[in-house]
Image: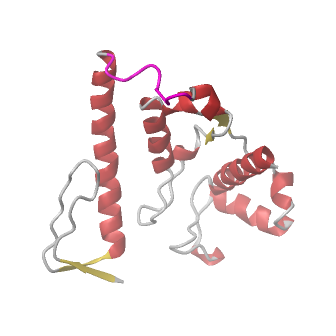
Amino acid sequence: LLFSAAVLKSVFTWGVDIFLLNLYVPVSWISSVLCLLSEKLVNLRLNEMDALEKHEVFPTKFNFGSKTTDDYKKRVVYFSDDTIGNFSFTSRHLMKPFRAAMTDSLVQSYGLTQCMKVMKTEWASEDDLKVFHTNEYIEAIKVATKTKSKKRGGDADCPEFFGVLEYCRAVAGSSLCKFRKIR
């Protein structure tokens, strides 16, 4: 796919302007550039927030009118996994797990965790995975975790990468934790 744009403006809420004048570039290239740019901007924003927080600009309590933060904590649950941001697909893949870590950092930095119940997710066991997948599939994922090979069919959409089994366990475990909470 090719992407054509006269102006791609205000990509982020921080007012970054990117001008692409009649350029034809692959969409994946634009996504990669935007992803790298967003990471840099979030780091800059977090540094600014750290500086502001030292001056106690952020409120220690939110004002919800007649409702308290405890009223909201009864209804809103935020699931967090400290490990998910450590995984990395291929550099060209659009899925960037570090975005989850950045989101988690922003939620904590803005003090939003005081408005909700925070729960840590747990990884799914191999037995949990076997409820939906065959033993052969899980064994293939184990091999893909340790090596990369074009022979097994990993492609641009579903790439093999080191740690793929652990990533699958983390994501499946997160889904199971959420299911158990609403069940």
Colour theme: secondary structure
- For residue 62: magenta? yes
Left or right of 12 in this view: 124: right
Q: Quadrant of residue 115?
A: top right
User: Which one is nearer the viewer's eye here, 75 or 81?
Assistant: 75
**Residue at the location (34% across, 34% down)?**
46
Q: Can the viewer see residue 124 in this picture? A: no
Q: Position of residue 143 (x, y in %)?
A: 70, 61
Q: Where is residue 29 in the image (x, y as percent from the top left)?
A: 31, 69
Q: How many labels does the image show?
A: 0
State the extent of the magenta-drawn residues as a range: 56-66
Q: Where is residue 77 in the image (x, y as percent from the top left)?
A: 65, 39
Left or right of 148 in this view: 132: right
User: Which one is nearer the viewer's eye here, 54 or 67?
Assistant: 67
**Residue at the location (35% across, 65% down)?**
31
The single residue placed furthest to the left in the displayed view is: 21
Q: Where is residue 78 in the image (x, y as percent from the top left)?
A: 61, 40
Q: Can the viewer see residue 162 in this picture? A: yes
The single residue placed furthest to the top in the displayed view is: 55
Residue 94 to residue 16: above or below: below
